[in-house]
Image (tube, rainbow, N blue to C red):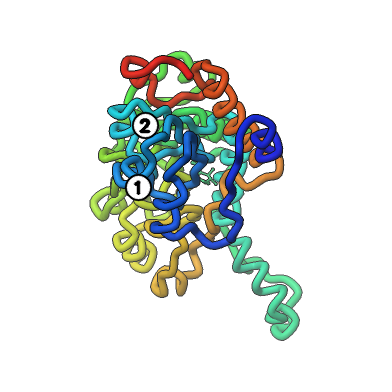
Amino acid sequence: NGIELLRKHFEVEVWEDEHEIPREVLLERVRNADALVTMLSERIDAEVFDAAPRLRIVANYAVGYDNIDVEEATRRGIYVTNTPDVLTNATADFAWTLLLATARRLVEADNFVRSGEWKRRGVAWHPLMYLGHDVYGKTIGIIGFGRIGQAIAKRALGFGMRILYNARSRKPEVEKELEAEFKPLEELLRESDFTVLAVPLTRETYHMINEEMLRLMKPTAILVNIARGKVVDTEALVKALKEGWIAGAGLDVFEEEPYYNSELFKLKNVVLAPHLGSATHGAREGMAELVARNLIAFKNGEIPPTLVNREVLKVRKPG
Ligand code: 8YV
């Protein structure tokens, strides 16, 4: 495991508590740290860097790194690394898990069986029972066409879907391979039966899916978010789901985590998960190992294999 691997090379201090590390404890504990392994729950910014004068590398146990002020890290010559690739398939699988579960109302149906309601009704079968949305042959729109977005598209090929995508830049090589069409955001939203969010959270993608965008979607459309909660304006989404501008949503990520929203939780046409996109045994092992490899490379005076801020090399030497 990753920590065992690290112990061979470093003196390791672990925050074992299942609760998040309190800010003041974090600021205290980083005082003598050369390296820091972080998760999404920790905001790593100038305040942390000020408290950690020896810090040379922040290895994020995640592919997304919106929890880290990368610009500030670069300015101070601190490496930032992430965990791409090792979680791509697990996360794409989970996007599909949510898509299918929402389209076919799996959670509602599961509750119907396990609550005893099925037995109480005494009706074995009815042609209109828990009707869902067709998936095969429909149109999927993928917003964000990096590794995870493309892996989601690959799976869509098996579902005979028309694949639309939107991204900062066009990707002609993959367009061919995945038979995917580039569309401006508005068009993608208008045409898709399923819209899946796979963008990183940045200044540009914050509340990218707002009321105006939700109103463009089909009333039969389903929105799936495995990216970051803040990409969607939740208040607008709740309105869209309640008023039927869209048919449903599968959400793995929320504007605040842990999340509670009594309005959203009342709705039957949503399937919710507590940020489980990469939560498989294989992906977690891969992430831990990659974090360790980045740190070991740093210790050996090499450039970490999945360095996020390459510009930092202008400010510091490898190692
Ligand atoms: C992690 C993620 O579970 O990689 C990411 O960006 O969101 C998830 O894989 C989470 O970030 C743990 O830090």
Q: Toward which corner of the image does residue 31 lie, by quadrant?
A: top left
Q: Nearer the viewer, residue 196 or 226?
A: 226
- Going 51% across and 24% down the picture, which residue do you hit? 306
- Going 42% across and 27% down the picture, which residue do you hit? 79
Query: Residue 120: x, y in percent?
Result: 72, 85
Real-space Cα separation, disc 2 to disc 1, in angstroms:
14 Å
- Going 42% across and 68% down the picture, which residue do you hit? 264
Q: Nearer the viewer, residue 305 or 133?
A: 305
Number of dots carrying numbers: 2
Give the side of residue 119 with respect to residue 239, left or right: right
Check the image and name the residue furthest to the left: 212
Query: Residue 270: x, y in percent?
Result: 49, 62
Residue tagged by mark 2?
166
Q: Secondary structure at mark 1?
A: helix
Residue tagged by mark 1?
231
Q: Is residue 162 visible?
A: no
Neighbour tally class for label 1: few under 14, some 14-19, many 20 plus, Cα within 10 Å: many
Give amino acid for label 1: Val
